[in-house]
Image (tube, rainbow, N blue to C red):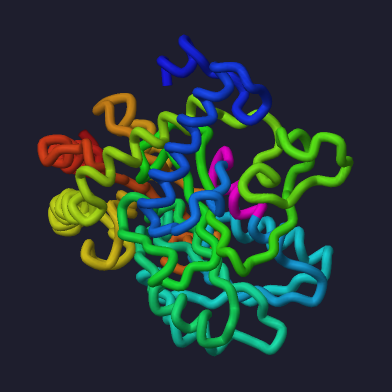
Amino acid sequence: MEDCIVNYCGNPGRSGHYMSMKTGEAVYQARKDTARLFGIKDPARLIFTKNTTESLNMAMSGFLQEGDHVVTTSMEHNSVYRPLKRLEESGVSHTIVKGDRMGRVSAQAVENALTESTSLIVITGASNVSGTIMPFDEIGKIAEQHHIPLLLDGAQCAGSIPIDVGSMKISMLAFPGHKGLLGPLGTGGLYVAPDIQLRPLLCGGTGTQSKSRNQPCDFPEGFEAGTINAPGIIGLGYSVRFIQKVGVEAISFYERQLIRQFDEAVQNMDFIELYGPAPEEKTGISLFNIRNVESEEVTGRLSREFGIAVRGGYHCSGFAHMTVGTWDTGAVRLSVGPFNTRKEIAKAIEAVWKIGKGR
């Protein structure tokens, strides 16, 4: 990223000088590498965005129209719920399929919620609250049988769970760069299958068809209006290549081992409420509360006294907290990544024990 910023960093697709051309080449390489990670055959169908929220808004607002019906779940992020709520003003309805107390959603329940007007299924790959992994592979096959596109929110699983858009029948995939892909903030992407017709979310400069006042719908330029975050995208490309070298399966296994170490220790503490499924059914997330201590207070103390970064509260997903039983209290979410260590997990376990014991 520094090399780009200091030595070239021209606006790709806007000029023929060497800085613009070198930036364009580096961005294209990042697009190819990211596409390869998800089994995307045509890299041009991968649009770079600034985050998953933009990608989800682009997918839903660009695809849905009056009279359409959407099936989603009670484990989604507000980046799904709030766009769907706004789309009600445009005549788009939706059904929320409820998960169980572990945050698990049945693929059969999703299929049962389909109607004649259902035109899209939107589901998270894994819950950002409980870490529960959704049966999106099975739901993808159901979607294909009913000729309904599947939009997968990959915010909590891209880079942590293997994803192949072809074999998993994913029509659109929204993902962030800064989470499991280990890239910089302000990067993300949206894959759109060739048979999906999408309207651009933003209109403006694309470097193409400059004489026309109409926004072009060519992939990917027509959907990346304005100047893109070239240094961030180039950085994302490097991190994706690192993930491919290590292997998503290896990362997933390691993160699960870390979260199992944490869960098995704290569940034996009589003052801990642990939520969500067993480690083999979730990503590297542990959701818990310390009885009689507010989740925000736990979060603050873990940071101030122990140097441990977690999140407390409702995690932008009220329905998910209602589903797993923390609607009234919120909860503390501890997340692990491939650079965490068993020693750090042991430190976190000790810190939780001290807070719970009032020390």
Q: Give the left or right position of residue 67, taking residue 136 as reference.
A: right
Residue 189 in sight in this render: yes
Q: Position of residue 324 (x, y in %)?
A: 42, 66
Q: Quadrant of the N terminus?
A: top left
Nearer the observer, 219 or 341 = 219
Q: Quadrant of residue 165?
A: bottom left
> Which residue occupies the extreme top position in the image?
6
Q: Give the left or right position of residue 315, taking residue 305 as reference.
A: right
Q: Position of residue 357 (x, y in %)?
A: 20, 42
Against 331, is 101 above or below?
below
Q: Position of residue 228 (x, y in %)?
A: 61, 31
Query: What span is colored magenta in the figure?
Result: 49-58
Residue ID at (55%, 17%): 18
Q: Position of residue 139 (x, y in %)?
A: 45, 78
Magenta run includes residue 45: no
Residue 317 in sight in this render: no
Dominant secondary structure (helix, strand or loop) of the stretch shown in magenta: helix
Magenta run includes residue 56: yes
Residue ID at (80%, 76%): 67
